[in-house]
Amino acid sequence: MSDLFDLTGLRAVVTGANRGIGFGMATALADAGADIIGVSTSIPDSGSEIESAVLARGRAFRAIRCDLSDATSVATLCEELRSAEVDILINNAGTILRAPSAEHPMEWFERVVQVNLTSQFALAQAVGASMLERGRGKIVFTASLLSFQGGINVPGYAAAKSGITGVVKALANEWACRGVNVNAIAPGYIATDNTQALRDDPERSRAILDRIPAGRWGEASDLGGAAVFLSSPASDYVNGTVLPVDGGWLGR
């Protein structure tokens, strides 16, 4: 049974690995045996916290800096990853910008969609091409509760995360029969930088907590099990799904 979740010898790319949900996913994959390529805008070549965490688990680590808001940087990263024989792609990096929709700057909308959706598809396309040639691979996107709901003051984020669910299904329709599993995790309200503004607002924080059956904000480590499952042989017959990890929010 343990072999179902064994990632020993596999190479995983985790975008946004330097902190938050990406950090939690990367360390969980390393615990399961995967070597990690961590991608982030600001990750140092060596000496990062995520590098130390992965090395402490006995796995190899490599850092790649990439600004996912910049199409040229994304194209360069895609070319680099095409030849890296990636077994697992965790398409996690994201950003959020908040302003009422009637006043939301178009450049904010476009930046959020570029980082959270367009760059994610480009990476999946590049890494997926190599996986299709080998007849195996796992791609896991980070969706959101706003893949199902509209949110407040985050139209770009809601649009991008809704788009992720469509991309996941579209890729699964084409690639499942060729040995590549494409799925997504939809985190609930997780205590990260992206939710700091909500947690700092007493009324919004209380309203959110009152709706979560688990009664607490999620932690980045809460996403690790789902990431390992969707990256492992245990999910070989799971295709095109969006798995909520939300403390029960969507069931309320």
Image (cartoon, grey):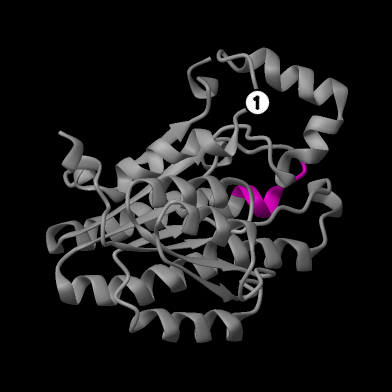
Mark 1 is surrounded, within 10 Å at the Cα level, by few (under 14), some (14 to 19) or many (20 or more) other residues, namely: some
Q: Which image quarter is the N terminus in?
A: top left
Give the residue at mark 1: 217
Q: What's the residue at 31%, 41% (across, down)?
A: 229
> Residue 182 is drawn in which quadrant?
bottom left
What amino acid type is highlighted by mark number 1?
Answer: Trp
Image point 45% across, 80% down: which residue? 78
Judged from the image, the secondary structure of the residue bearing numbered disc 1 is: loop
Q: Position of residue 161 (x, y in %)?
A: 55, 50
- Residue 28 counted in the magenta span: no
The region drawn magenta spans 153-158
Q: Is residue 217 above or below residue 182?
A: above
Residue 214 lies, in percent from the top left, at 56, 15
Q: Quadrant of residue 124?
A: bottom left
Q: Residue at x 61, y 76 (%)?
A: 45
Position of residue 9 relative to residue 145, above or below, is: below
Q: Position of residue 147 (x, y in %)?
A: 52, 42
| Magenta residues, dominant SS class | helix
Q: Is residue 238 left or right of residue 229?
A: left
Q: Decide whether residue 155 is among the magenta residues.
A: yes
* Left or right, 126 with reference to 76: left
Q: Residue at x 82, y 39 (%)?
A: 197
Q: Is residue 235 above or below residue 37?
A: above
Q: Is residue 60 left or right of residue 39?
A: left
